[in-house]
Amino acid sequence: MEITEVRVVLKDSPDKKLRAYATVTFENAFVVRNIKVIEGTTGLFIAMPSRKVKQGCPKCNFKNELRSKYCNQCGSQLPVNMHAPSAEQSGATQLEHKDIAHPITQSFREYLQKRVLDAYEEEKKKGSALGSSFEE
């Protein structure tokens, strides 16, 4: 599957790890938005779009975000197991978020990451070139 377009929007937050959002078009037929470019401890990487995991309230069945202490619908206290991860489940952010779309193979993940990070670097260069032209 060919990536036909990558658009990057830089984020202005020097103290945060989120550096940009990317929109990727595949074969001029399918678009994935909100791919995040994140500064990790070993360098830049991409995070696929995700949503917060929700669980139903045992009293009213309203869907509350994981780790909520009280139901947003009926106000009753939620069981502890709904807001505290179990010992067998590691990685708090993996428990709280689930990918909406993601690559199946490692080789495609590497290809996607390279294309997004290359586009990010190009956008950064454009941004710094524009910034320096305004100062003249």
Image (cartoon, grey):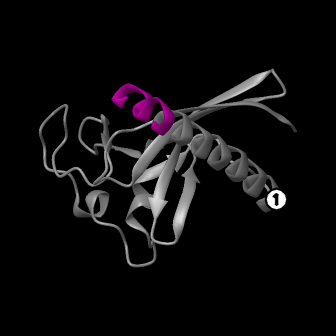
Give the main secondary structure of the magenta stretch.
helix
Q: Amino acid at mark 1?
A: Ser
Left or right: 1 with respect to 45? right
Foreground pick, 117 / 94: 117
**Is residue 2 found inside the magenta-colored segment of the image?**
no
Return the residue found at the far top. 29
Q: Is residue 35 visible?
A: no
Residue range (magenta): 128-136
| Quarter of the C terminus within the rendering | top left
Return the residue found at the far front. 136
Foreground pick, 19 / 75: 19
**Is residue 131 found inside the magenta-colored segment of the image?**
yes
Would you identify the image quadrant in which residue 86 lies? Answer: bottom left
Q: Is residue 113 visible?
A: yes
In the rendered image, residue 24, in percent from the top left (x then y), is placed at 67, 32
Foreground pick, 58 / 38: 38
Q: Residue at x 45, y 50 (%)?
A: 97
Left or right: 5 with respect to 127? right
Would you identify the image quadrant in which residue 90 lies? Answer: bottom left
In the rendered image, residue 58, in percent from the top left (x then y), is placed at 28, 45
In the rendered image, residue 26, in percent from the top left (x then y), is placed at 78, 30
Q: Secondary structure at mark 1?
A: helix
Foreground pick, 128 / 26: 128
Characterize the local packing of mark 1: few (<14), some (14-19) or many (20 or more) Cα atoms within 10 angstroms.
Answer: few
Left or right: 31 with respect to 51? right
> In this figure, which residue is indicated by the disc labeled 1?
107
In the rendered image, residue 25, in percent from the top left (x then y), is placed at 73, 28
